[in-house]
Image (tube, grey):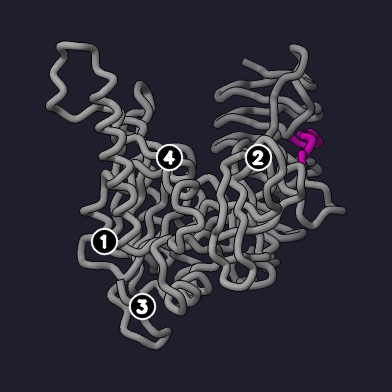
Amino acid sequence: MGGMGCGGSARGLRVLVSGLSQHLADFTLIYQEGSYLGISESLSILASGRCISGSRRGQMPRLMLSASSHLTELALGSPGDRYLQEFVPLGTGGGLYHFRDQILAGGPEAFFVLNADVCSDFPLSAMLDAYRHQPHPFLLLGTTANRTQSLNYGCIVENPQTHEVLHYVEKPSTFVSDVINCGIYLFSPEALKPLRDVFQRNQQDGQLCLPLGEDSSGLWPGAGTIRLEQDVFSALAGQGQIYVHLTDGIWSQIKSAGSALYASRLYLGQYQLTHPERLAKHAPGGPRIRGNVYIHPTAKVAPSAVEHTCVLHTIVGWGSTVGRWARVEGTPNDPNPNDPRAHMDSESLFKDGKLLPAITILGCRVRIPAEVLILNSIVLPHKELSRSFTNQIIL
């Protein structure tokens, strides 16, 4: 596909938010960020994910409706926004190929692919400028990590002059590079061709593995599973098709409850610098606001809401109440503040059969009485506690 100058007339852009069966936090942020960057007028969102069987079946379409209503409140959104449901796991790249017709409908200039389990300031405009200046099928957003933590991510070896990706290894066993994959991409329509090649190769390999005498004329069910990182990035690195755009903005994975709290703090700090109007402020007769706080427009917070209650490093579920003089506290697992390239480590709940200190989580409609301490604990929904708990899971 031919490139466009930065002042050219865009054919429209598309965003695919992948993995929404786990996370929905970034769905609204994409539009907020896009609107302030001046690209939302040509931006439409396709969200993909897999509904889990059982009680959660059908949950994602409802969550998408909830997110869409929030976009409406912000005067954002597009009639072209859709949720594309994966009924079977397709890997990080299989959904792109499976929904290729929907992605390319209308002939978009390019499309962003955003993993939903990351938080970022999403430098979409800078990535678009880099793409239009030097169009290639694949543009990856990269950041830096320290040598130890880089082993937990996809590692990129780049040409420092041209920013071409020369080598790519997903979660290597030894140090490869301190440049890591952020899970945020800008692809041209031509990027789907290598995915087609992987699909056809998977189909051929699957047919060769069929037991003797079985019909091999149909599609092999596993052919649609495509690992974008291993099957595409690693294979095409060094062939002039994959480039990286480095960012020094905020970025973190969201793999646990603790990382979600850390991501919220990153966003609040970013809003303080870029969009302070999004944060709650003191108002006559209202509650006293300390630090960076976001309060949803529909939330009701009374002036006396605190009542000498302390809640630190805790996720409080919908409809939960915390009594007066109670203390609900967790232990954060933040990155090393003395290492600017440090990121969140993967958390484990248990070690040697014991619950490790971590953030406290209150499920929905939990009632915490007055004058108790809840420390480093997980409280399941609809529980009414009567005493203090530390380092426990309350079932």
Q: Secondary structure at mark 1?
A: loop
Horizontal and vertical percent for residue 287?
70, 57
Question: Which amino acid type corresponds to the residue marked 2 in the rendered image?
Answer: Asn
Which residue matches tag 1? 80
Residue 238 lies left or right of residue 58; in this view the side is right
Of pointers 2 and 1, the one earlier in the residue sequence: 1
In this rendering, the answer to whether 234 lies above or below 15 is above
| Crowdedness near tag 1: few (<14), some (14–19) or many (≥20) residues, C-alpha within 10 Å | few
Nearest to viewer (mark 2 / mark 1): 2
Whether pointer 1 and pointer 3 mark residues with C-beta atoms closer than 8 Å, the reply is no
> Which residue, given by chain and number where applicable, does mark 4 sit on?
227
Which of discs 1 and 3 lies nearer the camera? The answer is: 3
- Whether residue 110 appears in this view of the structure is yes
What is the magenta range? 323-333
Which residue reaches farthest right? 338
Distance from disc 2 to disc 3, alpha carbons, whole Å, reads 34 Å
Q: Mark 4: which secondary structure? A: loop
Callout 4 amino acid = Arg
Amino acid type shown at disc 1: Gly
Q: Report which residue position mark 3 lands on.
A: 3
According to the picture, the residue beneath numbered tag 2 turns out to be 152
Q: Circle 3 — which element?
A: loop
The reply to whether the C-beta atoms of the residues labelled 2 and 1 are less than 8 Å apart is no
Residue in the picture at 29% in, 37% down:
201
- Asked whether residue 300 appears in the rendered view, the answer is no
